[in-house]
Amino acid sequence: MAYLAWDNTSTHHDDEIEAVVCGAMEHLVLLHLPTHSPWLNPTEMLWRQLLREATHCELFESIKALSAATLAFFRCRNAQPA
């Protein structure tokens, strides 16, 4: 069983997304979150940290450089998950 935070964002209201979710409902538990409540979604908190620590006010010369900074961020988080 997988838990899916369903935060009512506009991208969730797409026919293809809804078809995939409906097809997987026997394997999912939807956690319906209120609109505009990113603090309730742990993934949003992680993205906020990534933006603040790895990409904020940075101008990357290439996608490769951006990818390297992103991977370094996640490697650090995986090494020290707290």
Image (spheres, rainbow, N blue to C red):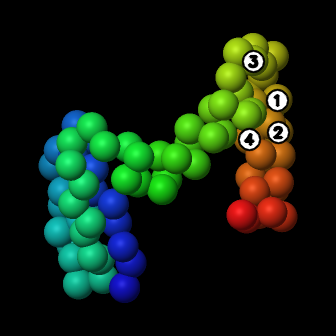
Q: Gap in Å between the C-alphas at discs 1 and 4? A: 9 Å
**Residue 28 spot, x, y in % from top left:** 29, 77
Tell me which label, 1 or 3, sits earlier in the chain.
3
Question: Dividing the image into 4 quarters, which one contains the N terminus?
Answer: bottom left
Question: With respect to residue 23, does 32 lie above or below?
Answer: above
Residue at position x 58%, y 48% from top? 46
What residue is disc 1 on? 65
Tell me which label, 4 or 3, sits earlier in the chain.
3
Can residue 17 be seen by looking at this rendering? no
Circle 2: residue type: Ala
Question: With respect to residue 26, does 4 lie above or below?
Answer: above
What residue is disc 4 on? 70
What residue is disc 2 on? 68
**Disc 2 or disc 3, which is closer to the eye?**
3
**Residue 66 spot, x, y in % from top left:** 75, 30
Kindly check if marks 1 and 4 are in contact, taking CB atoms under 8 A apart as contact.
Answer: no
- Marker disc for residue 58: 3
Q: Gap in Å between the C-alphas at discs 1 and 3? A: 11 Å
**Residue 80 spot, x, y in % from top left:** 80, 63
Circle 1: residue type: Ala
Name the element at disc 1.
helix
Q: Gap in Å between the C-alphas at discs 4 and 3? A: 12 Å
